Image (cartoon, rainbow, N blue to C red):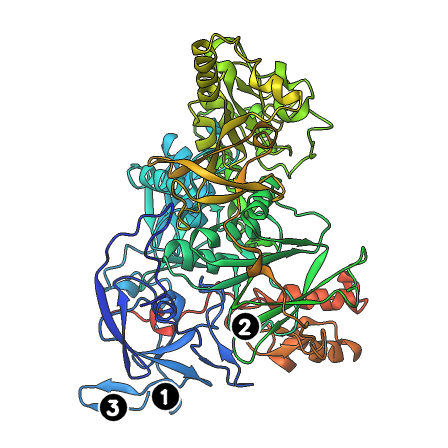
Amino acid sequence: MTDRLKEHPILDIAPKKEISFFWDKKRLTAFEGEMLSTALIANGINIFGHHHKDNKAQGIFCANGQCAKCTVIANGMPVKACMTEAIENMIVESAEGLPELPALNTGNARLPLPALNTGNARLPLPAINDSSFFAGSGSLAFPVETDVLIIGGGPSGLSAALELDKNGIKSILVDDKNVLGGKLVLQTHKFFGSVEDSYAGTRGIDIGKKLATEVLESKNITVWVNSTALFVFKDKKVGILKGNEYILVSPKIILNAAGAREKFLRFCGNDLVGIYGAGAFQTLVNRDLIKSSKRLFIIGGGNVGLIAGYHALQAGIEVVGLVEAMPTCGGYKVHADKLKRLGVPIYTSHTILSANGVEVVDSITIAEIDKDFKIISGTEKSFSCDTILIAVGLDSLSEFTEEAKIAGIKVFATGDALEIAEASSAMFNGKIMGLKISKELGVDVLDVPEEWYQKAEVLKSHPGQIYYPETKCSSPLTSRTEFGTTMGGEGEGSSVFPVIHCYQEIPCNPCTTVCPTGSIRIPNTDNDLMGLPIYDGTCIGCGKCLFICPGLAISLVDFRNIVNNAEMRMQNAEIPPPSPPAAQASQGGHNEAIVSLPYEIFNKKVKEGDDIEVVDIDGNPLGVYKVNEVKVNKTMKTQIIKVKMPVEKALKAISFKVQPDEISKPLDKAILPEKLDDNTMICLCEKVSVATVKSLIKKGITDINQIKAITRMCMGPCGAKTCDVLLRQVFRQEGIPTDNIVANTRRPLFVEVPLNKFIPKE
């Protein structure tokens, strides 16, 4: 199993029990409890089968059970590899074309499946309201009643459940994964936001564990993992597939905390193997500890894409580049800065032109676009890569909210199911919804305080204004020419100080909470979370601000040893001591300082005596310097790399390159697709192209159901979760007003379910 991570700078890699299974008659090794898709990729297998319509290769895409690109045949049955656990001696085969249902196996004799119609008599089905439906199945009493049904065990659902528990409200929390936490379990970076309200400065994986532990230990919360909410029916019951049992739940209130689904893109070659959503990539890398790629290219400069790039570097994956269609990245500047200074180029005002390859991705072609998002001819560039990560935004998973309203059940929504925002915002909004629901159920609690709403607005704020040192003080030593007088207070602390490289207003305050002298603060503003932090006081050189900063945007400049050594030499020689180092620097001196740089990619090891290329906030080189010392904070899992360098450069230093420029070098000649759009797949399940849809629209068809009947678009396993959005884009491009479009009639179940799940157990 050559593609498993052997070490990770943040995640512990514990030993696991090995099992074996068969893939196309070849014995392979897996770890107990992992999904088939993970085991296959760990064994270097990315192609899981071929599509029945065009024989194109199929492989993992969402890793979340939302599509069926990862379908394989396991013990004779077609299953989604990303949702099916590998079992000892399981016989797994690639899915070549349409899978066939196996014959019934009765002992040694194999019998054909029985017909449902026996003459004029139809076999009876159990009444859905019959309490004997689950007789002998071990299911809970039917129907299950609860005050609140919480759909989704991510940050918002967990926070809401804890608030309800505090107020004595009984709830059932369902989640389709085997571990609570939602996307928190994939986040190795430290969170932004408020320390007090959303665990800022703590890694997402640790926040997820903390919330999950509190929920599992609570008295009023019943947790169902490996459970999928299927539909909210008009009789005010919710169908839940709990493991292998189908259960109806009758709640007084539904809280939709189901999160969001990732958007997809139209581009040539978008159906090749090796194209992932960000969630799939992070699942493989951070949950399953698989080095799923060797060379990654990212589409989308929001926080999701930027963070995924950082996670890739932590897994030892080369990040060839990132493109963003807008003139600036939509994510936090500190996230983009982290990538740039580690050696990842970011191409703004660019878009993907094509994914290239025969069955799997082997390169990508990008191009620059103008202000109208039109491709600028002659700007095309191609890069070698084996994976393209799509991170172009999210759509709220609002189905359960809509279904509950139709059914007449009181419903609330929180987190991304309500509004796309950061996880810190989701947690706080979950708390608000928990209190609102408690009030709705008649519990004697106070109304939601106005300051909670105000804090919620702040936490979901988009990145604000960028202030560079020339325009506003963000760090006293990078924003003032008279920095010889701004080193802090008198005495010991005056020769060591933090330099804060944080120039964008974002909701974040961890650095202000850990300084033992209270010398890092956010100046009085209308918003105490969105202001830029400054250092103003006395520093003792503890480095706590370096360890806690989510953006790794603080360095520590230290003159103390240099000053002490110089003074000792002067005293021994009876020569007056020199003027302070900063003052000399302001006069053009070349004194050196020890600079401490935070580092979290240390699977790319740096040791004392190594030469490293130190860079500024934009990744511009400041010179090559030797590493003086490497310190590790085992609790925070952050390293501090110390280098000695001239003071005028020390004030700009914040990181060093870990990727050489050669990794991001384009191919000698751009690979240009013959057709830019019409051959693009708009429906991956049924392989419907843009050209096919355009031809129907030009015939006057504006009813999505009619397009669906003709092409089978929206009828595939994903249930229109991807193609419905892309189809509406084509309508807009063809000039069809939204009001003229007849919406797709959605299937009643959230995911496809084998019919035997509804058959009573004997």
The N terminus - image quarter: bottom left
**Amino acid type for the residue under numbered disc 3:** Arg
Instruction: Determine the CA span between mark 1 and mark 3.
Output: 15 Å
Q: Is residue 364 above or below residue 251?
A: below
Q: Nearer the viewer, residue 748 or 712?
A: 712
Q: Which of pointers 3 and 2 lies earlier in the amino acid sequence?
A: 3
**Amino acid type for the residue under numbered disc 1:** Ala
Which label lies toward us, 2 or 1?
Answer: 2
**Amino acid type for the residue under numbered disc 2:** Val
Position in image of residue 227 (x %, y %):
37, 57
Q: Is residue 43 visible?
A: yes
Please name the residue that numbered disc 1 is placed on. 115
Which label number is shown at residue 601?
none
Q: Is residue 448 visible?
A: no
Q: Which of pointers 2 and 1 lies earlier in the amino acid sequence?
A: 1
Q: Which of pointers 1 and 3 lies earlier in the amino acid sequence?
A: 3
The C terminus - image quarter: bottom left
Residue at 29%, 84% in the rendered image: 25
Please name the residue that numbered disc 2 is placed on. 361
Which label lies toward us, 3 or 2?
Answer: 2
- SS for callout 3: strand
Q: Nearer the viewer, residue 443 or 678?
A: 678
Position in image of residue 400 (x %, y %):
52, 54
Position in image of residue 52 (x %, y %):
51, 85
Instruction: Determine the CA span between mark 3 and mark 2.
Output: 42 Å
Mark 1 crowd level (few <14, some 14–19, many ≥20, 10 Å Cα): few
Q: Is residue 537 above or below residue 314?
A: above
Mark 3 crowd level (few <14, some 14–19, many ≥20, 10 Å Cα): few
- SS for callout 1: loop
Position in image of residue 721 (x %, y %):
56, 64
Please name the residue that numbered disc 3 is placed on. 110
